[in-house]
Amino acid sequence: MISVEEALERILALVPVLEPVEVPLLDALGQAVAEDVVSPLDIPPHDNTAMDGYAVCAADTAGASEASPVTLRVVGELAAGYVSDRSVEPGTAVRIMTGAPMPPGADAVVPFEETDEPAGHSFGAFAKSRDVVGILKAAQPGANIRRAAEDVRRGQPIIPKGTVLHPAQVGVLASLGMATVRVHRRPVVAILSTGDEVVAPGQPLRPGQIYDSNAWSISAMVLENGGIPRRLGIAKDTVDALTAKLREGLDADMLVTSAGVSRGDYDVVKDVLAKEGEVDFWTVRMRPGKPLAFGSFASGGRRLPHIGLPGNPVSSMVSFELFGRPAIYKMLGRSDWPRPRVRAIADEPIENSDARRVYARAILTHREDGRWHAALTGPQGSGILTSMAFANAFAIVPEDVPLVRPGDEVDCMLLA
Ligand code: AMP
Ligand code: MG
Protein backbone atom coordinates (compact mmCIF):
# COMPACT_ATOMS: atom_id res chain seq x y z
CA MET A 1 0.00 0.00 0.00
CA ILE A 2 1.41 3.39 -0.94
CA SER A 3 0.56 6.80 0.49
CA VAL A 4 -1.82 9.26 -1.12
CA GLU A 5 1.15 11.54 -1.92
CA GLU A 6 3.13 8.79 -3.59
CA ALA A 7 0.12 7.66 -5.61
CA LEU A 8 -0.45 11.19 -6.87
CA GLU A 9 3.23 11.62 -7.68
CA ARG A 10 3.29 8.42 -9.72
CA ILE A 11 0.14 9.34 -11.60
CA LEU A 12 1.37 12.83 -12.44
CA ALA A 13 4.71 11.43 -13.58
CA LEU A 14 2.88 9.50 -16.27
CA VAL A 15 0.47 12.23 -17.34
CA PRO A 16 1.73 14.69 -19.96
CA VAL A 17 0.92 18.38 -20.40
CA LEU A 18 -1.11 18.44 -23.60
CA GLU A 19 -0.05 20.42 -26.65
CA PRO A 20 -1.13 24.05 -27.12
CA VAL A 21 -4.01 24.86 -29.42
CA GLU A 22 -5.42 28.20 -30.53
CA VAL A 23 -9.01 28.71 -29.37
CA PRO A 24 -11.58 31.53 -29.58
CA LEU A 25 -11.29 33.83 -26.59
CA LEU A 26 -14.38 32.73 -24.72
CA ASP A 27 -13.48 29.05 -25.00
CA ALA A 28 -10.34 29.88 -23.04
CA LEU A 29 -12.24 30.94 -19.91
CA GLY A 30 -10.91 28.81 -17.06
CA GLN A 31 -8.05 27.47 -19.20
CA ALA A 32 -4.35 28.07 -18.60
CA VAL A 33 -2.60 30.14 -21.26
CA ALA A 34 0.11 28.07 -22.94
CA GLU A 35 2.60 30.90 -23.39
CA ASP A 36 3.32 34.39 -22.06
CA VAL A 37 0.98 36.92 -23.64
CA VAL A 38 2.88 40.05 -24.71
CA SER A 39 0.95 43.15 -25.69
CA PRO A 40 1.05 43.99 -29.40
CA LEU A 41 -0.13 47.55 -28.71
CA ASP A 42 -0.46 50.44 -26.30
CA ILE A 43 -3.63 50.77 -24.21
CA PRO A 44 -5.02 53.31 -24.49
CA PRO A 45 -3.58 53.70 -27.99
CA HIS A 46 -3.53 57.52 -27.73
CA ASP A 47 -3.85 60.31 -25.17
CA ASN A 48 -7.58 60.79 -24.70
CA THR A 49 -10.01 62.67 -22.52
CA ALA A 50 -11.37 61.16 -19.33
CA MET A 51 -14.25 63.67 -19.21
CA ASP A 52 -16.79 65.31 -21.45
CA GLY A 53 -15.68 68.95 -21.76
CA TYR A 54 -13.29 71.23 -23.64
CA ALA A 55 -9.76 70.45 -24.77
CA VAL A 56 -7.73 73.57 -24.08
CA CYS A 57 -4.23 74.97 -23.67
CA ALA A 58 -3.89 74.90 -19.88
CA ALA A 59 -1.93 78.18 -19.90
CA ASP A 60 -5.00 79.97 -21.34
CA THR A 61 -7.05 79.10 -18.26
CA ALA A 62 -4.68 80.65 -15.67
CA GLY A 63 -6.65 82.80 -13.25
CA ALA A 64 -10.07 81.71 -14.55
CA SER A 65 -12.89 81.84 -11.99
CA GLU A 66 -16.67 82.17 -11.86
CA ALA A 67 -16.21 85.90 -11.25
CA SER A 68 -13.81 86.36 -14.17
CA PRO A 69 -14.23 83.56 -16.73
CA VAL A 70 -11.69 83.09 -19.53
CA THR A 71 -13.43 83.08 -22.91
CA LEU A 72 -12.13 80.69 -25.58
CA ARG A 73 -13.22 80.34 -29.19
CA VAL A 74 -14.67 76.89 -29.91
CA VAL A 75 -13.10 75.64 -33.15
CA GLY A 76 -14.60 72.16 -33.35
CA GLU A 77 -16.25 69.20 -31.73
CA LEU A 78 -14.91 65.68 -31.31
CA ALA A 79 -16.69 62.46 -30.38
CA ALA A 80 -14.99 59.23 -29.31
CA GLY A 81 -13.97 57.24 -32.37
CA TYR A 82 -12.80 60.24 -34.40
CA VAL A 83 -9.56 62.17 -34.76
CA SER A 84 -9.45 65.96 -34.73
CA ASP A 85 -8.36 67.59 -37.97
CA ARG A 86 -7.81 70.87 -36.07
CA SER A 87 -5.19 71.90 -33.58
CA VAL A 88 -6.02 73.75 -30.43
CA GLU A 89 -4.14 77.06 -30.75
CA PRO A 90 -3.87 79.45 -27.79
CA GLY A 91 -7.20 81.16 -27.26
CA THR A 92 -9.23 78.28 -28.70
CA ALA A 93 -10.86 75.08 -27.50
CA VAL A 94 -12.34 71.89 -28.98
CA ARG A 95 -15.52 70.48 -27.46
CA ILE A 96 -14.65 66.85 -26.72
CA MET A 97 -16.35 63.66 -25.45
CA THR A 98 -14.94 60.99 -23.12
CA GLY A 99 -12.58 58.64 -24.93
CA ALA A 100 -11.91 60.97 -27.88
CA PRO A 101 -8.20 61.42 -28.70
CA MET A 102 -6.68 64.70 -27.53
CA PRO A 103 -6.45 67.17 -30.41
CA PRO A 104 -2.91 68.38 -31.19
CA GLY A 105 -1.97 71.46 -29.20
CA ALA A 106 -4.35 70.85 -26.28
CA ASP A 107 -2.79 69.81 -22.95
CA ALA A 108 -5.81 69.75 -20.59
CA VAL A 109 -9.52 69.09 -20.57
CA VAL A 110 -11.95 71.35 -18.70
CA PRO A 111 -15.11 69.40 -17.81
CA PHE A 112 -18.48 70.92 -18.73
CA GLU A 113 -19.17 71.49 -15.02
CA GLU A 114 -16.29 74.01 -14.93
CA THR A 115 -17.54 75.98 -17.96
CA ASP A 116 -20.52 78.21 -18.61
CA GLU A 117 -22.05 75.65 -20.97
CA PRO A 118 -25.56 74.96 -19.67
CA ALA A 119 -26.35 71.33 -18.96
CA GLY A 120 -28.51 69.35 -21.33
CA HIS A 121 -27.18 70.22 -24.79
CA SER A 122 -26.96 67.28 -27.14
CA PHE A 123 -23.82 66.79 -29.16
CA GLY A 124 -23.74 69.13 -32.14
CA ALA A 125 -26.60 71.39 -31.10
CA PHE A 126 -24.52 73.57 -28.83
CA ALA A 127 -21.75 74.26 -31.31
CA LYS A 128 -24.30 75.64 -33.76
CA SER A 129 -25.83 77.89 -31.13
CA ARG A 130 -22.59 79.46 -29.88
CA ASP A 131 -18.91 79.55 -30.84
CA VAL A 132 -17.33 80.58 -27.52
CA VAL A 133 -17.09 78.99 -24.10
CA GLY A 134 -16.39 80.55 -20.73
CA ILE A 135 -13.90 78.66 -18.54
CA LEU A 136 -14.74 79.05 -14.84
CA LYS A 137 -11.72 77.33 -13.28
CA ALA A 138 -8.02 77.10 -14.10
CA ALA A 139 -6.85 73.72 -15.45
CA GLN A 140 -3.44 72.22 -14.72
CA PRO A 141 -1.50 70.79 -17.69
CA GLY A 142 -2.51 67.15 -18.08
CA ALA A 143 -5.84 67.60 -16.29
CA ASN A 144 -8.43 64.91 -17.20
CA ILE A 145 -6.18 63.30 -19.80
CA ARG A 146 -5.72 59.53 -19.93
CA ARG A 147 -2.24 58.99 -21.27
CA ALA A 148 -1.40 56.66 -24.13
CA ALA A 149 -0.11 53.33 -22.75
CA GLU A 150 -0.97 54.23 -19.14
CA ASP A 151 -2.70 50.83 -18.81
CA VAL A 152 -0.53 48.61 -21.03
CA ARG A 153 2.67 49.28 -23.00
CA ARG A 154 3.39 47.62 -26.32
CA GLY A 155 5.80 44.71 -25.75
CA GLN A 156 4.85 44.47 -22.08
CA PRO A 157 4.27 40.92 -20.76
CA ILE A 158 0.65 40.99 -19.66
CA ILE A 159 -0.46 37.48 -18.78
CA PRO A 160 2.19 34.94 -17.77
CA LYS A 161 2.11 31.41 -19.10
CA GLY A 162 0.05 29.11 -16.90
CA THR A 163 -2.40 31.82 -15.80
CA VAL A 164 -5.91 30.41 -15.55
CA LEU A 165 -8.05 32.94 -17.38
CA HIS A 166 -10.74 34.77 -15.44
CA PRO A 167 -13.31 37.12 -16.98
CA ALA A 168 -11.15 40.23 -16.45
CA GLN A 169 -8.22 38.54 -18.19
CA VAL A 170 -10.44 37.52 -21.09
CA GLY A 171 -11.33 41.21 -21.28
CA VAL A 172 -7.66 42.23 -21.23
CA LEU A 173 -6.92 39.86 -24.13
CA ALA A 174 -9.84 41.34 -26.09
CA SER A 175 -8.55 44.85 -25.34
CA LEU A 176 -5.27 43.77 -26.95
CA GLY A 177 -7.21 42.95 -30.11
CA MET A 178 -6.78 39.21 -29.69
CA ALA A 179 -9.71 37.09 -30.92
CA THR A 180 -7.97 33.83 -30.09
CA VAL A 181 -5.45 32.64 -27.51
CA ARG A 182 -3.23 29.60 -27.10
CA VAL A 183 -4.19 27.21 -24.31
CA HIS A 184 -3.51 23.53 -23.69
CA ARG A 185 -5.89 21.20 -25.43
CA ARG A 186 -8.67 19.84 -23.22
CA PRO A 187 -8.06 16.18 -22.38
CA VAL A 188 -10.48 13.57 -23.62
CA VAL A 189 -11.15 11.22 -20.74
CA ALA A 190 -12.64 7.85 -21.68
CA ILE A 191 -14.89 6.53 -18.93
CA LEU A 192 -15.91 2.90 -18.63
CA SER A 193 -18.10 1.28 -16.00
CA THR A 194 -17.63 -2.41 -15.35
CA GLY A 195 -19.81 -4.97 -13.64
CA ASP A 196 -22.42 -7.55 -14.62
CA GLU A 197 -24.86 -5.90 -12.22
CA VAL A 198 -24.57 -2.40 -13.65
CA VAL A 199 -27.24 -0.95 -15.95
CA ALA A 200 -27.46 2.43 -17.66
CA PRO A 201 -29.99 4.92 -16.23
CA GLY A 202 -33.13 4.97 -18.34
CA GLN A 203 -33.12 1.17 -18.74
CA PRO A 204 -35.43 -1.11 -16.73
CA LEU A 205 -33.84 -2.51 -13.59
CA ARG A 206 -33.99 -6.29 -13.21
CA PRO A 207 -33.53 -8.17 -9.92
CA GLY A 208 -29.93 -7.98 -8.77
CA GLN A 209 -29.08 -4.98 -10.89
CA ILE A 210 -28.15 -1.41 -9.94
CA TYR A 211 -27.90 1.73 -11.98
CA ASP A 212 -24.55 2.99 -13.15
CA SER A 213 -23.87 6.14 -11.13
CA ASN A 214 -20.09 6.15 -11.39
CA ALA A 215 -19.93 6.95 -15.10
CA TRP A 216 -22.11 9.96 -14.47
CA SER A 217 -20.50 11.36 -11.36
CA ILE A 218 -17.05 10.90 -12.91
CA SER A 219 -18.12 12.39 -16.26
CA ALA A 220 -19.50 15.37 -14.37
CA MET A 221 -16.21 15.82 -12.51
CA VAL A 222 -14.26 15.58 -15.77
CA LEU A 223 -16.49 18.22 -17.31
CA GLU A 224 -16.38 20.47 -14.28
CA ASN A 225 -12.60 20.35 -14.23
CA GLY A 226 -12.13 21.25 -17.88
CA GLY A 227 -11.88 17.83 -19.52
CA ILE A 228 -14.05 16.22 -22.18
CA PRO A 229 -15.75 13.05 -20.92
CA ARG A 230 -16.24 10.25 -23.41
CA ARG A 231 -18.42 7.50 -22.00
CA LEU A 232 -17.64 4.05 -23.29
CA GLY A 233 -20.64 2.42 -21.63
CA ILE A 234 -20.62 -0.64 -19.42
CA ALA A 235 -18.43 -3.72 -19.75
CA LYS A 236 -19.31 -7.14 -18.38
CA ASP A 237 -16.96 -8.70 -15.81
CA THR A 238 -15.00 -10.80 -18.27
CA VAL A 239 -11.51 -10.25 -19.60
CA ASP A 240 -12.76 -10.36 -23.19
CA ALA A 241 -15.64 -7.91 -22.71
CA LEU A 242 -13.44 -5.50 -20.80
CA THR A 243 -10.57 -5.72 -23.28
CA ALA A 244 -12.90 -5.02 -26.20
CA LYS A 245 -14.42 -1.96 -24.50
CA LEU A 246 -11.05 -0.63 -23.37
CA ARG A 247 -9.78 -0.71 -26.95
CA GLU A 248 -12.47 1.82 -27.86
CA GLY A 249 -10.82 4.27 -25.48
CA LEU A 250 -7.22 3.88 -26.56
CA ASP A 251 -7.19 7.14 -28.50
CA ALA A 252 -8.26 9.19 -25.46
CA ASP A 253 -5.82 11.10 -23.26
CA MET A 254 -6.72 9.18 -20.12
CA LEU A 255 -8.72 6.08 -19.40
CA VAL A 256 -10.86 5.82 -16.28
CA THR A 257 -12.67 2.64 -15.30
CA SER A 258 -14.76 1.97 -12.25
CA ALA A 259 -15.06 -1.24 -10.23
CA GLY A 260 -13.37 -4.58 -10.68
CA VAL A 261 -10.22 -3.65 -8.76
CA SER A 262 -10.82 -5.30 -5.40
CA ARG A 263 -10.05 -8.87 -4.50
CA GLY A 264 -13.33 -10.45 -5.57
CA ASP A 265 -13.58 -13.30 -8.06
CA TYR A 266 -14.80 -11.15 -10.93
CA ASP A 267 -12.53 -8.18 -10.42
CA VAL A 268 -10.92 -8.36 -13.83
CA VAL A 269 -9.79 -4.76 -14.39
CA LYS A 270 -6.40 -5.42 -12.82
CA ASP A 271 -6.01 -8.62 -14.85
CA VAL A 272 -6.67 -6.79 -18.10
CA LEU A 273 -4.35 -3.95 -17.16
CA ALA A 274 -1.61 -6.46 -16.28
CA LYS A 275 -2.12 -8.42 -19.49
CA GLU A 276 -2.61 -5.59 -21.98
CA GLY A 277 -0.68 -2.83 -20.25
CA GLU A 278 1.48 -2.18 -17.21
CA VAL A 279 0.33 -1.97 -13.60
CA ASP A 280 2.06 0.73 -11.54
CA PHE A 281 0.25 0.26 -8.21
CA TRP A 282 -3.11 -0.96 -6.99
CA THR A 283 -3.70 -0.02 -3.39
CA VAL A 284 -3.51 3.32 -1.61
CA ARG A 285 -3.49 3.86 2.14
CA MET A 286 -6.78 5.76 2.28
CA ARG A 287 -10.44 5.37 3.22
CA PRO A 288 -12.58 5.27 1.23
CA GLY A 289 -10.79 4.15 -1.92
CA LYS A 290 -8.09 1.70 -0.92
CA PRO A 291 -8.31 -0.39 -4.09
CA LEU A 292 -7.13 1.89 -6.87
CA ALA A 293 -5.43 0.43 -9.90
CA PHE A 294 -3.09 2.70 -11.78
CA GLY A 295 -1.12 1.86 -14.86
CA SER A 296 -0.84 2.50 -18.56
CA PHE A 297 -1.45 1.05 -21.97
CA ALA A 298 0.81 1.47 -24.98
CA SER A 299 -1.16 3.39 -27.57
CA GLY A 300 0.06 5.12 -30.71
CA GLY A 301 3.65 5.52 -29.53
CA ARG A 302 2.72 6.93 -26.13
CA ARG A 303 1.64 5.58 -22.77
CA LEU A 304 -2.04 6.07 -22.09
CA PRO A 305 -2.63 6.50 -18.34
CA HIS A 306 -5.35 4.36 -16.83
CA ILE A 307 -6.94 5.04 -13.46
CA GLY A 308 -8.94 2.05 -12.27
CA LEU A 309 -11.31 3.52 -9.69
CA PRO A 310 -13.01 1.41 -7.06
CA GLY A 311 -16.65 0.51 -7.73
CA ASN A 312 -18.24 1.91 -4.61
CA PRO A 313 -19.73 5.24 -5.64
CA VAL A 314 -18.19 7.29 -2.84
CA SER A 315 -14.80 5.63 -3.20
CA SER A 316 -14.73 6.30 -6.90
CA MET A 317 -15.56 9.98 -6.47
CA VAL A 318 -13.10 10.52 -3.62
CA SER A 319 -10.36 8.77 -5.61
CA PHE A 320 -11.13 10.78 -8.72
CA GLU A 321 -11.09 14.00 -6.70
CA LEU A 322 -7.67 13.17 -5.26
CA PHE A 323 -6.03 11.70 -8.37
CA GLY A 324 -8.13 12.27 -11.49
CA ARG A 325 -8.65 15.97 -11.00
CA PRO A 326 -4.92 16.76 -10.60
CA ALA A 327 -4.24 14.63 -13.68
CA ILE A 328 -6.70 16.67 -15.73
CA TYR A 329 -5.21 19.90 -14.40
CA LYS A 330 -1.72 18.80 -15.35
CA MET A 331 -2.84 17.97 -18.89
CA LEU A 332 -4.38 21.45 -19.06
CA GLY A 333 -1.07 23.03 -18.04
CA ARG A 334 -2.45 23.94 -14.61
CA SER A 335 -0.69 23.52 -11.29
CA ASP A 336 -3.41 24.96 -9.08
CA TRP A 337 -5.13 21.69 -8.19
CA PRO A 338 -4.57 21.71 -4.41
CA ARG A 339 -7.87 22.63 -2.80
CA PRO A 340 -8.03 25.28 -0.08
CA ARG A 341 -7.80 23.84 3.43
CA VAL A 342 -9.02 25.09 6.77
CA ARG A 343 -8.76 23.82 10.33
CA ALA A 344 -12.18 23.11 11.78
CA ILE A 345 -13.67 21.89 15.03
CA ALA A 346 -15.04 18.38 14.66
CA ASP A 347 -18.65 18.35 15.87
CA GLU A 348 -18.77 14.57 16.05
CA PRO A 349 -16.29 11.73 16.37
CA ILE A 350 -14.46 10.49 13.27
CA GLU A 351 -12.93 7.04 13.53
CA ASN A 352 -9.88 5.67 11.82
CA SER A 353 -9.83 1.95 12.53
CA ASP A 354 -6.95 0.73 10.37
CA ALA A 355 -4.33 3.45 10.05
CA ARG A 356 -5.31 4.70 6.63
CA ARG A 357 -5.93 8.35 5.76
CA VAL A 358 -9.62 9.02 6.17
CA TYR A 359 -11.52 11.42 3.93
CA ALA A 360 -14.77 11.88 5.83
CA ARG A 361 -17.54 13.69 4.00
CA ALA A 362 -18.36 16.79 5.95
CA ILE A 363 -20.45 19.90 5.96
CA LEU A 364 -18.32 22.82 6.96
CA THR A 365 -19.97 25.88 8.46
CA HIS A 366 -18.60 29.07 9.97
CA ARG A 367 -20.24 29.64 13.35
CA GLU A 368 -20.84 32.44 15.81
CA ASP A 369 -17.73 31.44 17.78
CA GLY A 370 -15.69 32.59 14.77
CA ARG A 371 -14.54 29.04 13.99
CA TRP A 372 -15.18 26.57 11.22
CA HIS A 373 -17.08 23.48 12.32
CA ALA A 374 -17.20 20.13 10.57
CA ALA A 375 -20.27 17.90 10.85
CA LEU A 376 -20.41 14.59 9.01
CA THR A 377 -23.00 14.11 6.28
CA GLY A 378 -24.41 11.00 7.92
CA PRO A 379 -23.36 7.36 7.63
CA GLN A 380 -19.94 7.15 6.00
CA GLY A 381 -20.19 3.85 4.15
CA SER A 382 -18.41 3.94 0.81
CA GLY A 383 -21.61 2.89 -0.94
CA ILE A 384 -23.65 5.76 0.48
CA LEU A 385 -23.45 8.29 -2.34
CA THR A 386 -25.77 10.75 -0.61
CA SER A 387 -22.99 11.22 2.00
CA MET A 388 -20.94 12.69 -0.83
CA ALA A 389 -23.81 14.52 -2.45
CA PHE A 390 -24.26 16.99 0.39
CA ALA A 391 -20.66 17.37 1.52
CA ASN A 392 -18.78 20.60 0.90
CA ALA A 393 -15.51 19.34 2.37
CA PHE A 394 -13.49 16.30 3.31
CA ALA A 395 -12.48 16.17 6.97
CA ILE A 396 -9.07 14.48 6.82
CA VAL A 397 -7.90 12.17 9.58
CA PRO A 398 -4.19 11.35 9.33
CA GLU A 399 -2.98 7.75 9.21
CA ASP A 400 -1.58 7.88 12.75
CA VAL A 401 -4.68 9.35 14.42
CA PRO A 402 -7.10 6.58 15.46
CA LEU A 403 -9.89 8.90 16.57
CA VAL A 404 -10.88 12.53 16.21
CA ARG A 405 -13.01 13.45 19.22
CA PRO A 406 -15.78 16.04 19.19
CA GLY A 407 -14.13 19.40 19.88
CA ASP A 408 -10.79 18.33 18.36
CA GLU A 409 -9.38 20.28 15.44
CA VAL A 410 -9.38 18.54 12.10
CA ASP A 411 -7.90 19.50 8.73
CA CYS A 412 -10.60 20.06 6.09
CA MET A 413 -10.26 20.20 2.34
CA LEU A 414 -12.84 22.44 0.68
CA LEU A 415 -14.69 20.91 -2.25
CA ALA A 416 -16.50 23.99 -3.44
P1 AMP B 1 -16.46 -3.83 -7.18
O1 AMP B 1 -15.31 -2.89 -7.13
O2 AMP B 1 -16.70 -4.36 -8.55
O3 AMP B 1 -16.33 -4.89 -6.15
O4 AMP B 1 -17.73 -2.97 -6.81
C1 AMP B 1 -17.91 -2.43 -5.52
C2 AMP B 1 -19.33 -1.95 -5.35
O5 AMP B 1 -19.59 -0.87 -6.22
C3 AMP B 1 -20.38 -3.00 -5.66
O6 AMP B 1 -21.41 -2.90 -4.70
C4 AMP B 1 -20.87 -2.60 -7.02
O7 AMP B 1 -22.15 -3.04 -7.28
C5 AMP B 1 -20.77 -1.10 -6.96
N1 AMP B 1 -20.61 -0.52 -8.29
C6 AMP B 1 -19.78 -0.96 -9.24
N2 AMP B 1 -19.87 -0.22 -10.34
C7 AMP B 1 -20.78 0.75 -10.09
C8 AMP B 1 -21.31 1.82 -10.85
N3 AMP B 1 -20.87 2.06 -12.09
N4 AMP B 1 -22.22 2.61 -10.29
C9 AMP B 1 -22.64 2.36 -9.02
N5 AMP B 1 -22.17 1.38 -8.26
C10 AMP B 1 -21.26 0.56 -8.77
MG1 MG C 1 -17.73 -5.93 -9.38
Image (cartoon, rainbow, N blue to C red):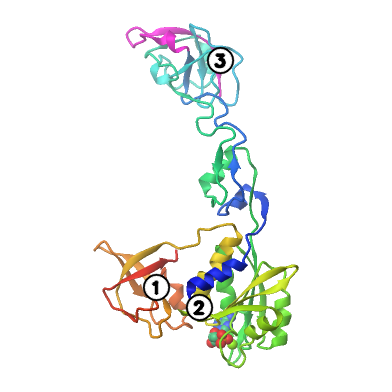
> Image height check: is 180 above or below 256?
above
Q: CA distance from mark 3 to mark 2?
A: 72 Å
User: Percent from the top left, x then y, of residue 90?
Assistant: 49, 6
Residue 33, visible in the rendered structure: yes
Mark sitting earlier along the chain (3/2): 2
- Determine the secondary structure under disc 2: loop
Q: Which residues are magenta?
A: 57-79
Q: State yes or no: residue 298 in magenta.
A: no
| Quarter of the view holding residue 310 | bottom right
Quarter of the image where one finds residue 199? bottom right
Residue 50 position (above or below residue 299): above
> Which comes sooner in the sequence, label 1 or label 3?
3
> Picture coordinates of residue 351 (x, y %)?
35, 82
Q: Label 2: which residue?
A: 2
Q: At x 51% / y 72%, what residue is drawn?
A: 6
Q: Dots 2 and 1: beta carbons under 8 Å?
A: no
Q: Amino acid at mark 1?
A: Ile
* The C terminus - image quarter: bottom left
The tag on residue 396 is 1
Q: Residue at x 41, y 85 (%)?
A: 354
Instruction: Indicate the secondary structure of the residue bearing disc 3.
Output: loop
Residue at the spot of label 3 = 104
Residue 320 screen position, x and y as percent? 54, 72
On the question of residue 220 being in view, the answer is no
Mark 3 surroundings within 10 Å by alpha-carbon count, few (fewer than 14), some (14 through 19), many (20 or more): some
- Circle 1 SS class: strand
Nearest to viewer (mark 3 / mark 2): 2
Residue 184 position (above or below residue 305):
above
Q: Disc 3 residue type?
A: Pro
Q: Observer-nearest residue: 253 or 223?
A: 253
Look at the image and say whether residue 75 sits in the magenta stretch: yes
